[in-house]
Image (cartoon, rainbow, N blue to C red):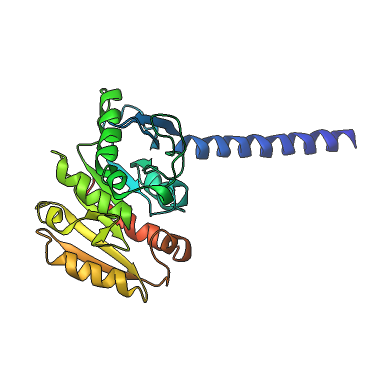
Amino acid sequence: MCYNKIVMRRFILSILALFLLFTTVVNAKNLTTKKDISVTSADGFSIKATFEYPKVKNKKEYSTVVLLHSLGYSSEWWENLPQELIDQGYAVLKIDLRGHGKSVFNSKLVRLSWKNMTNSSYAKYPDDVIRVIESIKKENTKKTFFNNWAIVGSDIGGNTAILASEKLKNKPKTIVLLSPTIDIRGLYTPVKLANLTDTDIFSISGTGDVGGEKAQDYLKKFAQAKFATYTSESRSTGMLMLKNDKSLAKIITTWISEYLPK
């Protein structure tokens, strides 16, 4: 009886050891470096972001995907897209646009919501994004994150993506637009889109989203590079499409993988 108990105990310990080993291997594969970013804008506004990338030994260059959320939302609403991108080996930069999420304090430390902002404040979105990108480039001189990169932007995030990209010397390889708009809160994009001669666009609208379809048909006239469109089965708009159409994250990641090395 005692012998059987010893054998059983050893068996259980062996199984437990194998389980712990398996868990360690799985966790090791999913290890990431995650950083909370805080950047002060030109007018003293505090812009918050999260930067995360997989830990790969001896890897010094990562392709990066920047995520810019919808009006009234934050970087917490991206559902499974960030993890899908990280699992594929990409670095992911999620930015809270001013007046949203954690980016709500101005130079006087007064909380300011997007609901109370004027168009002059929204006009600073592209420069805010550029400042965050430049900060990451400066602080990570031993690693390269923006030689090959892309942006995913939802409604106002998409407009910001186009306007910021037009200003940057090193353009993104592609921009993904969720529920595109022509002009939102004064961020008018068609003319600037025409200057992105080498950046392909992937525009996604939900089923029944008449406004999004009209916007992408109009923007397509200004695009100098490829402008592809896709209709999600979701009847939602913007970031909510990711919530209601679980296949969308993989579709976006597959599109990006055609442009960015892993």
Left or right of 9 on screen, residue 221: left
Q: Residue at x 27, y 48 (%)?
A: 151
Provide residue 218's location: percent of width, then percent of height.
18, 68
Q: Nearer the viewer, residue 21 or 125?
A: 125
Q: Residue at x 27, y 42 (%)?
A: 124
Provide residue 132's location: percent of width, then percent of height.
30, 34
Task: Confirm whether residue 154 shows in the render.
Answer: no
Q: Nearer the viewer, residue 7 or 202?
A: 202
Q: Residue at x 42, y 31 (%)?
A: 35
Quadrant of residue 62 within the rendered picture: top left
Relative to 244, does residue 254 appear above or below in the rendering? above
Provide residue 210's location: percent of width, then percent of height.
31, 75
Q: Point out the image quarter for the C terminus.
A: top left
Q: Point out the image quarter for the N terminus.
A: top right
Quadrant of residue 145 within the rendered picture: top left
Left or right of 260 on screen, residue 194: left
Quadrant of residue 19 within the rendered picture: top right
Relative to 9, does residue 67 appear above or below in the rendering? below
Q: Nearer the viewer, residue 159 or 184?
A: 184
Provide residue 31's location: percent of width, then percent of height.
46, 35
